[in-house]
Image: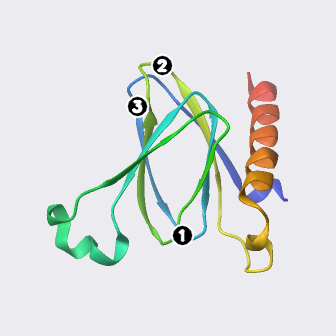
């Protein structure tokens, strides 16, 4: 897995990050729990008529988007958090087990964050 496709981000308490992600992109909760919110991209033209889908990611968990869309990512609690974004991969690579990919991303992100601190 190349580091060029991994994006590690930190969130301060109360901060929200918005990312326009492609289908099959992964979000991994590296430190702390995350709250993800997004709309079905195919129905985005309906604006507020379509409710947000909200997902809670616990530290170490991974969520893979099924379709392209803008995702709001925030800390689930009033404390700082960190997450890693993995860009979508080719069809052959996307057949990897999500748990295996999540463990690899979490380990790499933790190592990157330790070096940056």
User: At numbered mark 1, what does the secondary structure look like: helix, strand or loop?
Assistant: loop
- Could you tell whether 36 is left or right of 100 in the image? left
User: At numbered mark 3, what does the secondary structure look like: helix, strand or loop?
Assistant: loop
| Residue 71, picture quadrant | bottom left
Give the percent coordinates (x, y) of residue 18.
42, 50
- Precedes in sequence: disc 1 or disc 2: 1
| Residue 43, picture quadrant | bottom left
Q: Residue tagged by mark 3?
A: 15
Q: Is residue 100 above or below residue 87?
A: above
Q: Is residue 114 above or below residue 24?
A: above
Give the percent coordinates (x, y) of residue 117.
73, 21
Residue at point 52%, 23% (across, down): 80
Residue 79 shows which numbered tag? 2
Q: CA distance from mark 3 to mark 2?
A: 10 Å
Give the crowd class for mark 3: few <14, some 14-19, many >=20 residues within 10 Å. some
Give the crowd class for mark 2: few <14, some 14-19, many >=20 residues within 10 Å. few
């Amino acid at each position: 897995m190349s580091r060029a496709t991994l994006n590690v981000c930190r969130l301060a308490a109360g901060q929200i990050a918005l990312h326009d992600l492609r289908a099959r992109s992964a979000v991994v909760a590296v430190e702390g729990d995350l709250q993800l919110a997004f709309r079905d991209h195919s129905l985005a033209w309906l604006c507020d008529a379509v409710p947000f889908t909200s997902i809670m990611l616990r530290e170490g968990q991974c969520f893979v988007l099924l379709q392209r869309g803008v995702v709001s990512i925030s800390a689930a609690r009033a404390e700082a958090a960190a997450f890693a974004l993995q860009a979508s991969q080719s069809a052959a690579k996307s057949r990897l087990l999500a748990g295996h990919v999540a463990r690899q991303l979490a380990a790499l992100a933790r190592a990157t964050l330790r070096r940056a601190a």
